[in-house]
Image (cartoon, grey):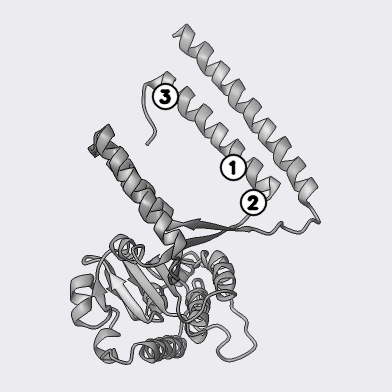
Amino acid sequence: MEFLAEYASFLAKTVTLVIAIVVVLVTAATLRSKGRRRSAGQLQVSKLNDFYKGLRERLEQSLFDKDQLKTLRKQQAKSEKKHKKQPESKPRVFVLDFDGDIKASATESLRHEITALLSLATPKDEVVLRLESGGGMVHSYGLASSQLARIRQAGVPLTICIDKVAASGGYMMACIGDKIISAPFAILGSIGVVAQLPNVNKLLKKHDIDFEVLTAGEYKRTLTVFGENTEKGREKFQQDLDITHRLFKNFVSQYRPQLAIDEVATGEIWLGVAALDKQLVDELKTSDEYLADRAKSAELFHLHYAERKSLQERVGLAASSSLERVLVNGWGRLTQQRFW
């Protein structure tokens, strides 16, 4: 027990010291970065053909013996030499990723990636977007969709690949593609609009607490959390939802006129197999399968715009990681429990 007490005291001192160091570093970083403009990010480009080639060569090394591998490498070198003498012009495929949260935060990178590729892409090329999103805020996904529309307006073929989910705002983005490819059990649809909020006005009245809402403009505030909601306010709020839903339906219909929009714009979701019957998608296939096939006849380039983190953010992340290790390791020794 005495050992545990001493160890707990040592751990408390260590944690206190780490927290103090973190506060000092973050304060210093804040002062240094104050007034500075945030540094620009960087566009990272990698050739996916090389990635697939590396996978194949690693497997060949495991399957073939020394002599077989030597013969194979000679054949490959001979083939590559022949192609260099008679180079063939291959189409280019620009591969992007969008992993959407409720705010569509990935739009910040997407907009720069699209700006970069449109400076070189032609109608002979192709853009493939690997999309994953369950939707989110109307204005956020509206902007993300507008970025993809730039590709269509430039006349560059756009293919959307969905492996897991593209629902609501996610499907709003997907429908812009010239072709939508989905994994058999990906989730699609949810062409609808939802809004919800709690109201605690009755609770406040029960405790004799008044809450007043003052507005200039009849519909500046329709529903509130604390005030007493009126039927007129509810009707206006519903009208706004209906207008947004109608705009959503019109947007989807513009890019996928083959849809029976009133049948699919009910807010329901479908798995890929059923979505194909509804014409929400054009083909059932994983993004891996599609890109591996394209790599046989095209040059694939993966684009990712990485934001440079400020000194304050880097220090904060490093300090947070260090503090977590101290807490987990110390507590784990003291209680023999693990954090998952």
* Label 2 close to label 1 by CB (< 8 Å): yes
Residue drawn at x 21%, y 83% as measured from the top left:
278
* Observer-nearest of 101 and 125: 125
- Residue type beneath disc 3: Gly
Q: Secondary structure at mark 3?
A: helix
- Badge 1 crowding class, 10 Å Cα cut-off, few under 14, some 14 to 19, many 20 or more, is few
Q: Is residue 311 above or below residue 203?
A: above
Q: Which residue is painted at 40% across and 51% down in the image?
A: 51
Which image quadrant: the N terminus? top left
The amino acid type of the residue labelled 2 equals Lys
> Would residue 272 be seen by someone viewing this image from the given angle?
yes
The local secondary structure at tag 1 comes to helix
Q: Estimate the x, y position of residue 309 in percent, counting from the top left.
A: 64, 51
- Cα distance in 3D space between marks 2 and 1: 10 Å
Circle number at residue 165: none
Q: Is residue 270 left or right of residue 102?
A: left
Return the residue at label 1. Answer: 317
Image position, residue 66 (x, y; %): 28, 33
Answer left or right for 128 relative to 153: left
**Residue at 51 percent of width and 71 percent of height:** 226
Residue 98 visible in this rendered orientation of the protein:
no
Q: CA distance from mark 3 to mark 2?
A: 32 Å
Circle 3 residue: 332
Q: Which residue is mark 2?
A: 309
Comes first in the chain, label 3 or label 1: 1
